[in-house]
Image (cartoon, rainbow, N blue to C red):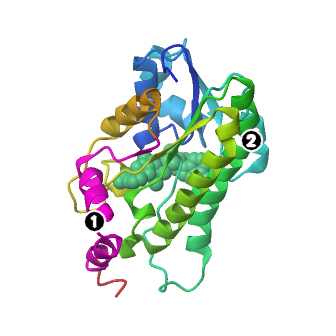
């Protein structure tokens, strides 16, 4: 599909990669962008310039993707492109921790929240000719990062979901894209002592891949190398990540 003159909805649009998606969509000529976020009023206060500059194209909508009522209210009949960007990382391992609450929360947002959005929007996309869904996964979807053990598991669930909905929605012509970033320079990765790529690179690469009809994309320099290493040896790369286990977890 073409981004120019399209209508898109982005989750977690108030900051990080989500905000970069909104700006990239508008720069590429999207007709309308629904920027979905948990706290619309806070965004209006923190980003008045953005709200004013894009007022003809942008509509802010309140949305916590784990809240079924809010997901239902967020369904807009003109959406052709759904970007499932919202996500959380609690930086917890799988074993340490008194309860399962952190792991459950990651699964609730990253997996069930995204699934809930896709189920809500699939009929709209069908009605609008098929359209596209982009799910923001992670290289950690494919190999567990022990520093983010339970996050990796939730993103692995999202990987399977992405394959499943791609098959289930093929008959209605919906293009399902998986995005697998490495470390990106946002709040989520602020305590990660690694080289990071820009959110703008992820956003622009995703939109280009949507236009080209690609399915799984590795955009930043870390992700591109990861993909090569993963194809050579999935076990090898999991072992490499295991060596990055922090003292707090081991
Ligand atoms: N940064 C990286 O290194 C990296 C690497 C690979 C993949 N990713 C993925 O990229 C996506 C965007 O992350 P980011 O780096 O931009 O992180 P971020 O700066 O922490 O932003 C996360 C966004 O998700 C939103 N969000 C969290 N829980 C939500 C919920 N229940 N309902 C709706 N929105 C919710 C946040 O909203 P609030 O502002 O209200 O909290 C925020 O807008 C995530 O899916 C993440 O897993 C990031």
On the image, the x and y values in percent for residue 88 come to 50, 57
Give the Cα distance between marks 1 and 2.
38 Å
Quarter of the rendering occupied by the C terminus = bottom left
Which portion, as a residue range, is magenta? 215-243
The label nearer to you, 1 versus 2, is 1
**Nearer to us in this view, 137 or 147:** 137
On the image, the x and y values in percent for residue 135 come to 52, 46
Residue 82 in view, yes or no: no
**Nearer to us in this view, 121 or 18:** 121
- Residue drawn at (60%, 65%) of the image: 107
* Main SS class of the magenta portion in the image: helix
The answer to whether the beta carbon of the residue marked 1 is less than 8 Å from any atom of ligand 1 is: no
Seen in the picture, residue 124 relative to 222 is either above or below; the reply is above
Please report whichever mark, 1 or 2, sits nearer to the chain's N-terminal start: 2
Looking at the rendered structure, the secondary structure element under dot 2 is helix
What residue is shown with label 1? 232
Q: Is residue 221 magenta?
A: yes
What residue is shown with label 2? 120
On the image, the x and y values in percent for residue 198 come to 28, 41
Q: Residues within 10 Å of mark 2 (few under 14, many from 20)?
A: some
Residue 179 in view, yes or no: yes
Seen in the picture, residue 80 relative to 98 is either above or below; the reply is above
Asked if residue 89 lies left or right of residue 66, the reply is: left
Q: Residues within 10 Å of mark 1 (few under 14, many from 20)?
A: few
- Residue drawn at (77%, 49%) of the image: 68
Q: Is residue 203 magenta?
A: no
Seen in the picture, residue 2 relative to 161 is either above or below; the reply is above
**Nearer to us in this view, 229 or 182:** 229
């Amino acid at each position: 599909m073409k981004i120019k003159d399209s209508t898109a909805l982005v989750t977690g649009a108030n900051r990080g990669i989500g905000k970069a998606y909104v700006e990239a969509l508008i720069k590429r000529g999207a007709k309308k962008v629904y920027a979905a976020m948990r706290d619309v009023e806070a965004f209006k206060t923190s980003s008045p310039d953005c709200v004013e500059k894009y007022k003809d194209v942008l509509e802010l909508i309140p949305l916590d993707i784990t809240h079924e009522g809010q997901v239902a209210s967020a369904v807009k009949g003109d959406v052709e492109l759904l970007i499932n960007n919202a996500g959380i990382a609690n930086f917890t391992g799988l074993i340490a921790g008194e309860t399962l609450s952190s792991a459950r929360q990651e699964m609730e947002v990253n997996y069930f929240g995204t699934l809930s959005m896709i189920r809500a929007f699939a009929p709209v996309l069908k009605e609008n000719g098929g359209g596209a869904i982009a799910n923001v996964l992670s290289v950690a979807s494919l190999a567990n990062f022990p520093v983010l053990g339970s996050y990796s598991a939730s993103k692995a669930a999202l990987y399977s979901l992405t394959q499943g909905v791609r098959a289930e929605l093929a008959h209605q012509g919906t293009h399902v894209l998986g995005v697998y970033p490495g470390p990106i320079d946002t709040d989520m990765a602020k305590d990660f002592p690694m080289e990071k790529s820009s959110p703008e690179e992820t956003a622009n690469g995703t939109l280009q891949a949507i236009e080209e009809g690609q399915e799984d994309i590795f955009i930043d320099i870390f992700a591109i190398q990861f993909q090569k290493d993963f194809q050579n040896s999935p076990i090898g790369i999991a072992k490499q990540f295991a060596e990055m286990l922090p003292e707090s977890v081991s």
